[in-house]
Every structure is written in C-alpha cells, then in structure tokens.
Image: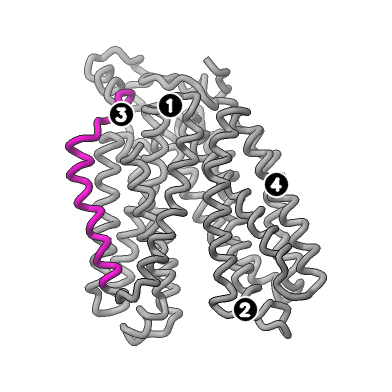
C-alpha cells in the first residue's frame, strides 16, 4: 500500500511542477512561455506512451520491479530538467519523465487488485488516487517556498533513492508470482500458455476481451474529455476580463478555486472508493456522474446570469470536483476486468489511449466553441459527458470485488462474474 501511494504521490509532484514554474522556466531559458506549454504537452504525450509500454512490462516482469523502474525514470528525468541549458533538452527530459509517470497508474492498480482484501479494494484505490492531490500540495509548497525552479526540479531525484527500499523490502504480488510458477510447471492450458508467449499488447487485442477494451477506452476518453474541457475553460473564465464574460480574478482571487479543486477532488476520490465497495462499482460510478450532472447544470445557471464570483459559484465548483471521484472507481474496476497475465496491460492501454483522445479533443473542441457560444454552455458541456458515462458504465461486465486468481479464463471475464 505504501509503495503504491508513494509512487502515485511523487508522480503528481513531477507532473505539476512544470505547470507551476512555467513562467520562471521560460524566463530562465530565454524562450516564449508557449514553448513551455508545448513542453507540458510533450510530457502528456510521453505519459500516454509510457503508460502503454510500462503496463506491458508490469505483466511481463512483475508489478514491484516495474513500479521501481517507473519511479527511477520520472525521478531522474525530472532532476535532469534542472540541468537543461536549452528548451530542447528540457522537452526531451519532460518526455522521458512523462514515460515514467505514465507507467504508474496501471501497475499500481494491478498491485492493489492482487494484494489487498477484495472487499476493501475500492477504498484503497480511492486512497492511492488521492495521493495525486496530496502530491500537488507538495508541488505548490515547493513553488511557494522561494526555491528556484532548478532546485525544486533537482529535488525530485530523491524518490529514486526510495527504489532501494522498494526492491529490498516490498514483496512481489503473490498472485503474479503464482502465475509464473504455474507457467514454469507447465500446468496452464496450452491455449492460454500460447497467448502468454506473445507480447502482452498483442495478446490483449487478440483476446476475447476486445469488446471490453473498446468500451473501457470509450469511457476513459469521455472522462478525460470532460475533465480537460472543463479545467481549461474554467481557468479562462476565472482570468478573463468581465467585459469579455469572465470574472477577471488575479492570482490571489483564483486561490480559493485552486484549493477547492484539490480538496474537492481528494474528498471525491476517497469517498467514491468507499461507496464502490459498499454499493458496487457501476452503481457508485453512476451516482457520482449524476452528482456532476447536477453540479454542471447549476453552474450553467450561475454563469449564464452574469455577476461576480459568488459563494455559490465556489460551492458548485467544489461539488463538480467531488464528481471527479469516478477516476478512482474506474481504476479499481479496470484492474478487475482483466486476467492476471493482462491486468497491467489491459487497464494501461485503455486508460492511456482514452487519455490521449480525450485530453486532445476536450480543450480543442471547447476552445473552438467558446467564441461562438460563450462561457455558460461550454462550462456545462462536460455535464452531458457525465450523463452519458452514467449509462455507458453499465456496458462493462460486473466484476467488482471479485476473487483474483493467478490463472484466469478470458471468456468468463468478458461475460462478467458475480461476487464469489
């Protein structure tokens, strides 16, 4: 649990530091701020690439070993950014760091599914997801500390030292170990054994779970579309002059919304995990989607009427951030959808491909529509996505809280399993 939480925590620090320090980095390197924004996008591209690549390593070489590799990659690469003399080298390091952070998600949730009691699996998934929000607070603390951006980035080499502890004291998943022992003993059905000889991604796309992969990827794409469409437009809404339809807030005026984003998201992730254990993954997911639909609807009412930044606006923003808890539910559910030999590859492929699609389309489409329709309908657009997600989640088979076994049949998972 500690290994998964720390990995997630420090990956957040790595991801957020460049966002916070982008003006200082641009000034230090003598480039336009747009170049640093491009570097942030390069990091997201690396994250998508790394998520798919590291997910396969997690199935091939083990959860703990791959988790350690991902921590070393993003720690050393981020520390390398502190020494970058040019924006080109900064982007190269940012891409490599993104590769490491991308591997964190699928490997961490695969580990949770295999070592944690099944009736509390969703709860721990929520706790681990919330570590990203806590890591964001550390990044903010470094930003506010007065340290230079190079020192702050350089401090990120420290998590790599923790890999020594990780490899010496944290045991490998016993479920994954049992699968390797069964393979060595030749006790696995020949069809399944032949599938395990292929590259994990090839095996995934040729499996009976292809329909599940497509549905889960669609859900992840809509989730990321909703998140990135809202987050980019809402920041513009806070900063835009009143004459142009925004609130015209200065950085200090934005601070309550930044705090609400982090705290609301943290509460939502933990609460969603708890409720998913009590009511089931799909029911909890739909409930949190409907909370978001109500929040976005009320946000439309508030923003279409004009006016300033009211307490009601901050409250509804907090409610919307709580609905982000669907991320922790989907993390736990995705790791339960796939057999042990694909438990890292399956979720990693779906989540990262969906993030790539939604992360690109969300800001792009909302940005194109904003000049024509104004803030109110575009801010409410993600609510339509959440309404669709509340229904789409029921297309996935019911596997929440199932018993995880070393050797599993793909066909049974494709049809859905009852709690055992």
Give the magenta-colored segment's residue range: 151-176
The residue at which mark 4 appears reads as 291
Which sits earlier in the primary sequence, circle 4 or circle 1? 4
Give the CA distance from mark 3 to mark 1: 14 Å
Up the image or down, 337 lies above or below 318; here it is above
Label ID, residue 173: 3
Label 3 neighbour load within 10 Å: few <14, some 14-19, many 20+:
some
Marks 4 and 1 in Cβ contact (< 8 Å)? no
Asked if one can make out residue 259 in the rendered structure from this viewpoint, the answer is: yes
Which sits earlier in the primary sequence, circle 2 or circle 3? 3
Marks 4 and 3 in Cβ contact (< 8 Å)? no
Give the CA distance from mark 4 to mark 2: 27 Å
Is residue 369 or residue 121 the one in the foreground?
Answer: 121
**Comparing labels 2 and 1, the label whose residue is closer to the camera:** 2
What secondary structure is found at the residue carrying circle 3?
loop
Label ID, residue 249: 2
- The residue shown at (30%, 76%) is 148
Up the image or down, 350 lies above or below 47; here it is above
- The residue shown at (23%, 41%) is 166
Is residue 314 or residue 110 the one in the foreground?
Answer: 314
Give the CA distance from mark 4 to mark 3: 36 Å
The residue at which mark 1 appears reads as 339
Asked if one can make out residue 214 in the rendered structure from this viewpoint, the answer is: no
Instruction: Give coordinates of residue 158: x percent, y percent.
Output: 23, 57
Label 1 neighbour load within 10 Å: few <14, some 14-19, many 20+:
many
Which sits earlier in the primary sequence, circle 3 or circle 1? 3
What secondary structure is found at the residue carrying circle 1?
loop
Give the CA distance from mark 4 to mark 1: 32 Å
């Amino acid at each position: 649990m500690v290994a998964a939480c720390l990995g997630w925590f420090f990956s957040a620090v790595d991801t957020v530091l460049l966002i916070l320090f982008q003006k200082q980095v641009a000034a230090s390197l003598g480039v336009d701020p747009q170049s640093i924004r491009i570097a942030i996008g390069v990091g997201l591209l690396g994250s998508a690439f790394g998520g798919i690549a590291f997910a396969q390593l997690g199935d091939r070489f083990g959860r703990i070993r791959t988790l350690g590799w991902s921590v070393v990659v993003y720690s050393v690469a981020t520390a390398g950014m502190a020494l970058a003399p040019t924006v080109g080298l900064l982007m190269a390091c940012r891409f490599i760091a993104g590769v490491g952070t991308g591997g964190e998600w699928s490997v961490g949730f695969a580990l949770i599914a295999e070592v944690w009691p099944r009736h509390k699996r969703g709860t721990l998934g929520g706790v681990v997801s919330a570590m990203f929000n806590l890591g964001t607070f550390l990044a903010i603390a470094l930003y506010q500390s007065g340290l230079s951006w190079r020192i702050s980035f350089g401090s990120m080499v420290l998590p790599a030292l923790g890999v020594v502890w990780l490899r010496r004291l944290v045991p490998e998943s016993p479920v994954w170990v049992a699968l390797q022992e069964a393979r060595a003993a030749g006790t696995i059905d020949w069809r399944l054994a032949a599938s395990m000889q292929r590259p994990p991604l090839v095996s995934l796309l040729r499996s009976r779970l292809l329909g599940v992969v497509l549905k889960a990827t669609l859900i992840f794409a809509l989730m990321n579309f909703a998140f990135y469409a809202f987050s980019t437009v809402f920041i513009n809404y806070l900063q835009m002059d009143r004459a142009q339809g925004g609130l015209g807030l200065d950085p200090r005026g934005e601070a309550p919304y930044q705090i609400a984003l982090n705290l609301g998201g943290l509460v939502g992730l933990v609460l969603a995990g708890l409720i998913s254990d009590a009511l089931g993954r799909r029911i909890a997911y739909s409930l949190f989607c409907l909370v978001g639909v109500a929040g976005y609807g009320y946000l439309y009412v508030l923003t279409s009427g004009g006016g300033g930044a009211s307490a009601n606006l901050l409250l509804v923003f907090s409610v919307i951030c709580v609905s982000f808890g669907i991320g922790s539910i989907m993390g736990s559910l995705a790791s339960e959808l796939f057999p042990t030999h694909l438990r890292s590859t399956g979720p990693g492929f779906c989540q990262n491909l969906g993030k790539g699609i939604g992360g690109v389309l969300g800001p792009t489409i909302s940005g194109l529509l904003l000049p024509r329709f104004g803030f109110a309908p575009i801010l409410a657009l993600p609510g339509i996505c959440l309404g669709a997600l509340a229904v789409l989640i029921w297309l996935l088979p019911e596997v929440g809280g199932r018993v995880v076994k070393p050797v599993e049949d793909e066909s049974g998972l494709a049809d859905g399993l009852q709690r055992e």
